[in-house]
Image (cartoon, coloured by chain):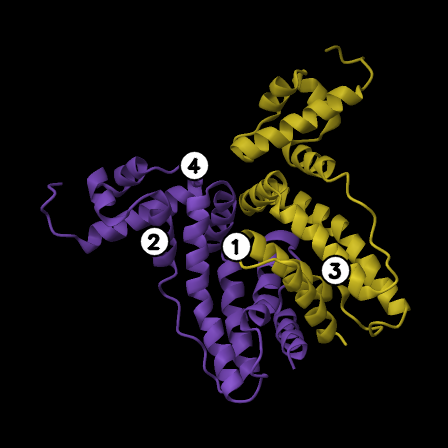
Chain colours: A purple, B yellow
């Protein structure tokens, strides 16, 4: 594992895959650059060359798992755009693998301010899809120009998160539609 | 620690205190009836006589930590009642000790269905305060009789949870008031 070797995409993937697996199995505290390198079959220096530290490594792995995400929906109407986003979010929060990683991130972020900061940046990045949908709706005149887009998106996304991870109340299609309708009514 | 000894409130408290401390330090997986008994200075059988198992023990400890909670606010108006509830919720979710326990519960519940069920029952129990506030508002004619109280409360409580644990977006008084106003507008 000489330092001069070019970066291999296979090693990139192996590192991220090992990180997600160890994070899911043992949580943030049970994961180290050393155990990731071992599981990925690379040298510790190979991990360090790619990731500044443990929080960056974990968030890079979360980003990688999510990389299949599509662009913002653009159906031509805010209601159907928001229902599409809500449906995607529900899938992420209720799929076993993905939801366990999210839950572990929340718990670890409560103990580790550096991870919390990296997590916060990741969440802000994901939120851009929702902001795009709201801004297009404002341009089309479907929502007032002074709409607080962040608050509107929280009225939909936060209850999906809360029901998936905390209250385990229903999250059927009718609930998602009701959330979108109430959020739009709140800002009408 | 003879089996015939009467239940001592001091032992009750020591067990719950030890449980919360170990849960916070090591999470659900790092906690056992054995380590709790050791930290509390009681026999394992003393723990087992009081708690059916690990999920019940952890939720009993969470309930005990929260036992100082006041009854539902009753200011005579739904807006100020909901602002009072929202303010309490923010305090719970942003106080270091309390918020770490909540975050650890969320993560552990994602791995352990028995803990998830106990957590769900606890959340439903806490929710009764909010339902009381909404039902009184309906009786006073401040909200329509067909108001979905659970959904209305989620429009306020879930964003507080989400901002405290996930996005770390602002949770100042103006945000809480905006959440309450939007939620009421959504159901007007």
Image coordinates of residue B177 in percent, x first then y, are 69, 64
Between circles 4 and 1, the one closer to the viewer is 1
Mark 3 touches mark 4? (CB < 8 Å): no
Between circles 1 and 3, the one closer to the viewer is 3
Residue under label 2, please give it. A60
Q: Note whether A147 is above or below A117 in the view shown.
A: below
Instruction: Count how many numbered circles sit on residues in the image.
Output: 4
Image coordinates of residue A22 in percent, x first then y, are 38, 42
Between circles 3 and 4, the one closer to the viewer is 3
Mark 1 belongs to chain:
B
Residue under label 1, please give it. B166
- In the picture, which quadrant includes the N terminus of chain B? top right
The residue under the point 32% across, 49% down is A17
Between circles 1 and 2, the one closer to the viewer is 1
Q: In this view, which residue lies farthest toward the right?
A: B140
Residue under label 4, please give it. A29
- Residue B91 - label: none
Image quadrant assignment for residue B53: top right
The tag earlier along the polypeptide, 1 or 3, is 3
The Cα–Cα distance between marks 1 and 2, rounded to whole angstroms, is 17 Å
The Cα–Cα distance between marks 3 and 4, rounded to whole angstroms, is 37 Å
Helix, strand or loop status at disc 1: helix
Callout 2 and callout 4 share a chain: yes
- Residue B83 - label: 3
Mark 2 belongs to chain:
A
Label 1 crowd (10 A; few <14 / some 14-19 / many >=20): many
């Amino acid at each position: 594992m000489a330092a001069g070797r070019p970066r291999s995409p296979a090693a990139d993937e192996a590192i991220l895959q090992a990180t997600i697996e160890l994070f899911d199995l043992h949580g943030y505290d049970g994961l180290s650059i050393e155990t990731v390198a071992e599981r990925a079959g690379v040298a510790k220096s190979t991990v360090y060359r790619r990731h500044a530290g443990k929080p960056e490594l974990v968030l890079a792995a979360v980003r990688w798992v999510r990389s299949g995400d599509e662009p913002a929906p653009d159906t031509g109407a805010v209601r159907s755009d928001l229902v599409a986003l809500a449906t995607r979010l529900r899938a992420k929060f209720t799929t076993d693998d993905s939801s366990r990683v999210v839950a572990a991130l929340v718990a670890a972020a409560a103990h580790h301010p550096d991870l919390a900061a990296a997590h916060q940046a990741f969440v802000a990045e994901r939120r851009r899809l929702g902001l795009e949908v709201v801004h297009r709706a404002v341009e089309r005149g479907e929502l007032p120009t002074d709409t607080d887009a962040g608050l509107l998106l929280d009225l939909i996304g936060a209850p999906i998160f809360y029901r998936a991870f905390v209250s385990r109340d229903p999250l059927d299609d009718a609930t998602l539609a009701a959330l979108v309708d109430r959020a739009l009514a709140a800002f009408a």
